[in-house]
Amino acid sequence: MIVYADVLFLINFIINALLLQATALLGKCQRVAWRIVFGAALGAVYAVCMFFPRLHLFYTLLFKLVFGSVLMALVFRPARLTAFLRISGIFYAVSFLFGGAVFGVMLLTDAGVMSRAVIQNGVLYFDLPAEVLFGTVSVCLIGVWVWRKTAPLRLRKQSLYRDVQVTYEGKTVSLRALVDTGNTLTDPLTLTPVMIAELDALRELLPPCPTFSVEELSVGAMATRLRVIPFTSLGTKHGLLLGFRPDAVTIATNTHYDIVVGLYEHDLSDDRSYNALVGADLIV
């Protein structure tokens, strides 16, 4: 079989770009065009180099996983380890989906008989017709887009809310929290993330006070838990929010011990559908 490096690079570049686009679409990641182009080109170079016998060490399972991890870090730049693992899982799932679709077409049509194969550096390479390869991947990409657009609205709404339990001094209060992508508050001293909750919903955790001021709350164990958090919002440029650090905050099934709860004296929701706000980073 004759393999042309330029054709192999171009095909892999286009396929890689489609895979990265599908990953960003499913993972709801910010898409930066030049990073996707760079990642697609890097993957295409890796595919071309598999035909160099002396580079067989770079095509072991371990190195393939390392290469995929580096590719995800460069293209999507996840801020947290959990986000990195999530986007990597989506990328591999999309790749397996598209690869399975190509194999399915090969088995169900004459493309499988017509394609020739060669194994190089442990990689199985098929000489597939370009129209079969691009057609199959394009159909899968369209299917991903349609699936995203037709997801039930009810499930989307449910994904906006989380059940939260705040524990302090042996007492626990349950809250209904809205996932707020605009909530990026942190404690300026410790950089601890801050969630916001209605004061009325947390009264039984706090000492009895008429006005819940800093002076009134600075008594006993609560004195070392208080935080004053500066914030900026629509209509408030230099606001201050009083908060405290509870013993634990459980969001869905994940328990955090380093979250500050900001106390909001008014209702967060007009229809009382939620009484707390959590940042998207705490959910991811």
Image (cartoon, rainbow, N blue to C red):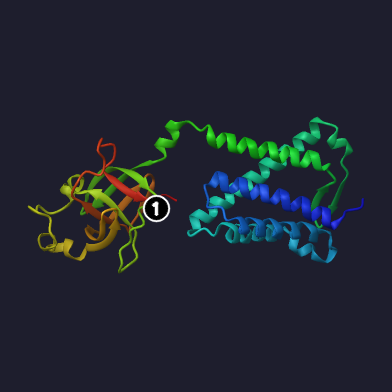
Examine the rendered structure and indicate whether residue 70 appears above or below residue 105: below
State left or right for residue 196 relative to residue 79.
left
Q: Residue 142's spot in the image, x, y percent?
A: 64, 37
Please, which residue is most extreme toward the front here?
A: 235
Q: How crowded is mark 1: few (under 14 residues within 10 Å), some or many (20 or more)?
A: some
State left or right for residue 116 relative to residue 144.
right
Whether residue 245 is visible, yes or no, is no
Taking the spot 80% from the left edge, 49% from the top edge, the residue there is 124
Q: Residue 115's spot in the image, x, y percent?
A: 87, 41
Give residue 224's quadrant in the image.
Answer: bottom left
Residue matched to label 1: 282
Examine the rendered structure and indicate whether residue 74 appears above or below residue 23: below
Q: Residue 76's spot in the image, x, y percent?
A: 56, 57
Q: What element carries label 1?
A: helix
Whether residue 124 is visible, yes or no, is yes
Please, which residue is most extreme toward the right here?
A: 1
Taking the spot 30% from the left edge, 63% from the top edge, the residue there is 187
Judge by depth and name the residue closer to the eye, 63 or 169.
63
Give residue 97's quadrant in the image.
Answer: top right
Q: Residue flagged by tag 1: what amino acid is it? A: Leu
Q: Residue 18's spot in the image, x, y percent?
A: 67, 47
Please, which residue is most extreme toward the bottom here?
A: 189
Judge by depth and name the residue closer to the eye, 111 or 249.
111
Please, which residue is most extreme toward the left here?
A: 210
Could you tell me how many numbered marks the image carries? 1
State left or right for residue 56 relative to residue 229.
right
Give residue 135's quadrant in the image.
Answer: top right
